[in-house]
Every structure is written in structure tokens, then in C-alpha cells.
Image (cartoon, grey):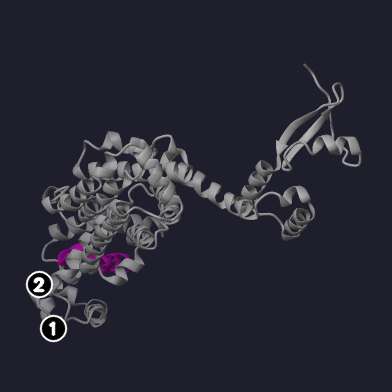
Amino acid sequence: MSHSYLPIRRSATQQQNKFRSFPRSQVCLLDQKTSEFVPFFNFSTFFFVFDSAVSVFGFPGETLEKDFAFRKKSPLLQSIPKTRMENTSLHSFLSGFIGFSSALSLLFVLGELPLAFKNRRNRTLLYLFVGVFIFQAHAYLLVSQQIRRYPHLYAIHLPVAVLFGPLLRSYISSLWEEEDSIPLFRWYDSVPFCGILLFLAPFYLSSAEEKLKCLETAQQGHFSWDLRIGIAGMSLTLLFYLAHIVWNLVHRVRWTTIWDKPELRMILSILFVAAASSFLGLSGSIQQISLSRLELSSALIAALLCGLYVIRQSHPEIFSAVKRIVEEEKKYKNTQLKSVDLNSLENKLNILFEEKKIYKEENLGLARLSEELGISPHQLSEYLNLHLKKNFFQLVNGYRIQEAKRLLLHSSETTVLSIAYEVGFQSKSSFNDSFRKEVGLSPTEFRKKTRSKT
């Protein structure tokens, strides 16, 4: 049946009397054919959507002021609880954001499945994402009230979250140790997991009605003592593992390197978010306001997942880069140059090669050069490898070839053999091999080519 609707005119007494029969928050339209009022929509729903839009997108201040003034004047809107209108928008946004993050974590799980069989590190990452998915999905069910449909899923995240610590330690440790030497779990890692699982076993085995009753009391800010102890145990365990991971990281990598390298700062960000979430859970269990704290901690994890997704898409080799940085730091930690002034050493080396041209000595060796620099041959070799990325022969031959190129261009009467001896080579063959390797041409070809150009 088709109807044509007109908005109610509140000036008409008859329409107002019929209109008052509906709830004060209900807006109705008048059917012209039947002269009956038909419900159209509820203002509570409208302002729930409106407040959500304000919290997410924002509106100009003038528009909001007019809207709030309209609410104060309207007797219809005064019937809607103020706290509900103000709080539902943020709650709805966080609930949707947490739900989105649970779907994103599931996407991570599916993405890691094909890689899980390659090595232990990928399997560890897969288990981590599975745990994060369970944690975020539980948080979404809780904050969206969908947990009432599945009461037996209530609090399943507690033993799962305990495993985050060992998994994070195993994954991050693989960045500075051999993978085969790192077990996924050690025997003592199972103690907190089994302890919380056994401690909460009576709760997990209870009926759906009992769990719903616990959920009702939790939403009012009163937790049962077993859940409070479970939350506190989970939070303390995770904080302990995070502190151990940070200590290992700082023990192996200098603070200056951590702040200089964005890859290491990302690792610290992950650990910081995990620590903040654990602290929120711990404080919530003490103050008995853990549902709101769970919402905040899950929102932190959701933001981290979004950032991690962007980083992995734009820099897929970021964790390989972290491993390379840690390996370089390992070499630095075992260095023999701690007592050496590297700036002074660099200046001495430049003077010897650029001013004194020590490379022209035919019998120049590592021992002779280190003696001139006042350090041991091992220290000189380490300095060249780590800081100049060259070995001794690459350094000396590089200077010799540059000098030979200069002489080939400007000393046209000098033979190639004479130039070879002058720059420090002991034979023409070694000179030709080194020159061709460096320039791509033999000395004679180089001289002819440059002459033809000039």
C-alpha cells in the first residue's frame, strides 16, 4: 500500500494530541489517506549517529554550539539522557575500531600461513598474530555486548595473552641469535600459562548463566576475585617478559644506535604498546574498572596493528634490516678499538696517504702501516673493515691506481712500466690486473682513450 507522508505540524491541536501518544523521542509522519500517525525514526538513534560523526570527523564549532543550544530548548531531546548521548559516540567508535583491528589481525594470520613452514621465526610470528586475533576479537565481543550471545568465550583472552611474552622474546631474540638455538618455549614459560588456566578452570567450566552474572557485575565495576587475580597475573607476566626483552636489546645495541635507526625504534614502539596494555590491565584489576581499561588497551593494540600493516607494506624487509643492524653492533661490542681515538686515527691515515704518499713504498704492508699509525695490525685491520669497508690491499691499491691515472694523463712520455714502479707496484702484470679491475681498461687502453677524447 502506497502512502504519502507529510511532516507533522505541531501548531495543530489535534495532531499534537495524537502525537503525544508516541514516546517523546519518537518522530512520526502523518498518512494523508488514513489520517493516522506513522512512526518514522527515533531521535536517540539519530543523535547516536550524529555524535559518532562528530567524534570521528568533527564539525565547525559554530555548528556544534547551535546544535547544543537546540538540544537545550527542545523538550523532546531533553528526555534523552545526556551521558548516553555524550558517551555512546566514543564507545561506538572504539568498538568499531577494535572490531576492524581483529579483522586486520586475522588478515595477518592468513598472510603468514604460507610462510609458516619456511622457518621458526615465521611460525613464531604466526602464533603471535593468532594470539592477537583472539585478544582483539574477545575485546570486540565484550565492548559491543556481543559476548552475551557467546558467554563461554568470556575471559578466554587471559591465558592466551600470557603467551605473548614468550613469543615476543623468541621472535625478537632471533634477530641477534641463531634461530636453531632459540626454542619457541622453555619449560618455565608454561608455568604462568598453566597456572592461570588451572586457576580459572572453575570459571571456564561454569554455566552460561553464571558467566553472564559475572559479566553483569564486571560491567558495574565489581570483579570476582578469581578474574582479578587472573588479569593481574597475566599483566605481571607480560611486563616481566617485556622488561627482559628490553634489557637484552639494550645489552646488545647502543642507545645511540637505537635512536638513530627507525627499525629499532619500531621494535621499541611495539614493546611500549604491549607494556602500556599490560599496565592498563594491571591497574584495572586493582581498581576494578578493567572493562574500560580493556577498551583502551585494545585500542592501543589496534593502532599498533594498523601502523604495522602500513610499515610491512612499505618496508617488507624491515626485520631483516634489524638483524643486520644487530650483527653490526655485535662486531662493535667485540671491538679492539675501544681505546683508540677514531678521529685521530682517520686524520693520521689521510696524512700518510694523501700528503706523504706512503702507498708508493713497494714493501708496504699491514705491519708497517700500523706501526706508523701507532696501533696493532689487528686494530688497523678491524678499523679498515668496519669503518672504511675495505681491506688493506683495497685501500693501498685504490690510492696507487688514482695516482697512476693522474700520471698516465699528464706524463705522456713516461712508460706504463715506469708508472707502475713509481706508484708502488712490483710488476707490470700486477699493475695491469689491479688497474683493469678498478677502471675496466688496461693502463695502455686508458691512456689511448683519454688522449683520443682530448
> 154 left or right of 48?
left
Residue 130 in the figure: left or right of residue 453: left
**Residue nearer the viewer, 331 or 292:** 292
Residue 414 seen by the camera: no
Query: Circle 1 is placed at which residue position?
Result: 374
Asked whether residue 396 is drawn in magenta, I would say yes
> Residue at the spot x=73%, y=49% of the render?
77
Task: Give how far across and how far down residue 405 sits, in percent.
Answer: 28, 64
Which stretch is magenta? 389-418
Q: Is residue 43 magenta?
A: no
Residue under the point 44% across and 43% down:
140
Q: Position of residue 88 (x, y in %)?
A: 58, 49
- Determine the residue positioned at 27% across, 66% down: 402
Look at the image and tell me in which quarter the C terminus lies.
Answer: bottom left
Task: Specify the quadrant of the image occupied by residue 287.
Answer: bottom left
- What's the CA distance linking mark 1 and mark 2? 12 Å
Numbered label attached to residue 378? 2
